[in-house]
Structure formats: C-alpha cells, structure tokens
Image: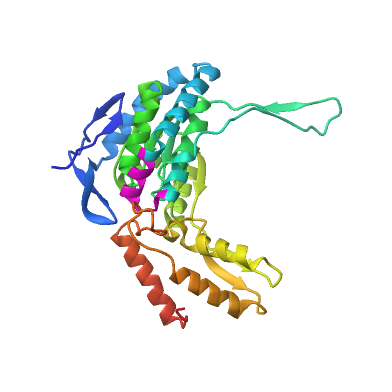
Amino acid sequence: MSDRFANFIGGEWVAPATGEYFENRNPADWDDVIGCFPRSGAEDVARAAASARRGFARWSKTPAPVRGEVLHRVGDLLVQRKEEIARAMTREMGKVLAETRGDAQEGGRRWFGRTVPSELRDKWAMSFRRSIGVAGLITPFNFPLAIPTWKMFPALLCGNAVLFKPAEDVPHTAHLLVEILLEAGLPPEVVQLVHGQGSVVGKAVVDCPDIPVISFTGSTETGSIIGATCGRMHKRLSLEMGGKNAMLVMDDADLDLALEGVLWGAFGTTGQRCTATSRLIVHERVHDGFVKRLCDRAGRLRLGPGLDETNEVGPLVNEAARKKVDYYVGVGRQEGAEIL
C-alpha cells in the first residue's frame, strides 16, 4: 500500500474535500510509486485562502527581523537536508543528482528597501516593500524546490501569506518544503499547500477573490489565460513562461566553451526548461566542424535513471512529455528537417 499524503490547510494536514487521490511515480521506474496525493478541488482552495487570510493578519504584524530569523532557519534546514531533498527530487521528476543538488542549494535572497534618484534638486526618494495579502504560487515540475523558494521567500519575508500549488508531477518535494517551513517555526496558517490538477486547483487559485497576488511559472498558453483573468480582476501578477531560445556561435568564439554551452543549454534537465536552447545559429565558417563536434558529444551523453550518478541525462518527466517530444520530431521531419 502506497503512502497517502495530505494537503496542508488551516494549520493541519488534511484530506481533500473531493476524497480523491492520484499516484506519484518515479519516471525512471514506473513500478516505483512514491505515494498517493490529493486530487483537490475548488472547495479546498477556498478553505486554504480563508486560512491564509487569517495567517496574513498576524504574520504581517510580525517584525521583519523575526520573519527573517524564521527564513534563516529554513535555509539552515535546507542545507542540512540537501542530499535527502535532492534524491527525493530525482526520484520524483527524473533529472540527475548533479542537477537536483543544485536545485536544493537554491535558497532565500536578502531583500532591502532602496533609495532612488530624484530629478528635483535637494529632494530624495526611497521605496519600501510592504505586505499585500495572500500570494497564490503556482509552480512547475522542472525546478521543484528552487522556483517555489524563489517565489515564496520574498513573499514571506515581506509579511505575506502564501497558498502553494505545486505541479502534479512533484507533490512530494512540495510536501518536504512545507514540512521544513513548519519545522523552522513558520506560523501554520501562513502557508497552505493544496495539491491537484492545474486545470482545477490552479484555476481556483487564480479565480479566488481573496488572493490578490498570483505568481505563475509554466506554459505560455496557461500563462496567457492567467494573465487575462488577473487583468480582469486587477490582481498583481508575475508570469514566467516558455521561451524559444536561440544561441549564436560566431567564427571568433571559443568553440570549446560554446560547445558545452550549447550541449547543456539544450539537454540539461532533459531539455525541460523555459530557458532551454531550442535554436542554434552557427557562423558558416565554423558551421560544419562545430555541428560534427556537437553531434559526437551529444551521442556520448549517458542517459538513464537520475539516481545513478554515472548518468548525465535523466528521463522525461512523464509519458505525455515523451509523446510531445516525439510529436515535434515528427513535425520536423514533415517540414523537411534533417535529423542529425
């Protein structure tokens, strides 16, 4: 029997109102079931938002140095549990340990007010960060610890509460992060964790009138929908979406350095990054030799389960991702692309 995990709502680990769960499996070993996680609904989001508002009312009045001390303890715990978290991430979403260790290394940032120049003589201006309310954080699978902490820590440090909706493929890493936040002393209602499908839970978070701030990292298509909703509701919004990123290699470039940049820009995290290199433009003087070297090096990449430290590239995160890659390879062939 697989472990059954819960949402964290109202200061408690609770079952979803739907009573439904989904399995989370290791993409490198489909027989390895990590656990069963809540397939939550809009009712769970509404309860979490109400609890987060209560948490915000208290947390926003907590002195900033005290909030900073809590987050400093979070950072310490992340460092102490780095290897455990890295292995959990690799088991859950597939990328190799060298990458998930880097993901686990990412932590909070120090945030300050700042002075700004004024065009008026003998006048000066400054800005301060002030808490807003509940921040809805919708995060992707590819950096399951780094991106949530990048979003979460500044929000918490500035006195906001957070409602955290992780990608369906990485619920266990999200669970570990919330455990660490609570262990570090974050007041329970300041953080809410609601698992489930983006089309249901993510939509409910964006639509909720009690969540004035939305931060989303994911596809351009979904981000466009979120942007339209937040614009209509006058919510504060941060979007990080997909890119079609190009790399140019000129004839006077350091070709050894360029080769490594192209290789890992394209194939790091198995290519599953919004910053992944998807277009390569090479100067005609060095084109043929560079492309040959790139193909030779790519052909020697060691592919396999990410927990095996001899491997350089892990599996795609799920079957849908594999089918999408296969589809676009087919599109390339149909459009006359030469497969190298």
Place of residue 301 in the rendered image (x, y in percent of width and height, measured from the top left): 43, 65
Q: Does residue 221 lie above or below 103 as drawn?
A: below
Q: Does residue 318 lie above or below 129 as drawn?
A: below
For image coordinates 42% across by 80% down, the residue present is 333
Asked whether 84 or 230 is in front, the reply is: 84
Q: Report how many numbered discs are placed on residues in the image.
A: 0
State whether residue 165 appears in this view: no
State whether residue 197 appears in this view: yes
Q: Which residues are magenta?
A: 84-97
For image coordinates 40% across by 63% down, the residue present is 302
| Residue extending furthest toward the bottom | 336
| Residue extending furthest toward the front | 310
Place of residue 78 in the rendered image (x, y in percent of width and height, measured from the top left): 43, 33
Asked whether 261 or 280 is in front, the reply is: 261
| Residue extending furthest toward the left | 1
Q: Is residue 174 left or right of residue 57?
A: left
Q: Look at the image and say whether residue 93 sits in the magenta stretch.
A: yes
Place of residue 316 in the rendered image (x, y in percent of width and height, measured from the top left): 35, 59
Asked whether 60 or 245 is in front, the reply is: 245
Asked whether 175 or 155 is in front, the reply is: 175
**Quarter the N terminus occupies:** top left
Quarter of the image where one finds residue 206? top left
Examine the residues drawn in magenta and state their main secondary structure. Answer: helix
Q: Is residue 194 left or right of residue 278?
A: left
Q: Look at the image and say whether residue 55 sits in the magenta stretch.
A: no
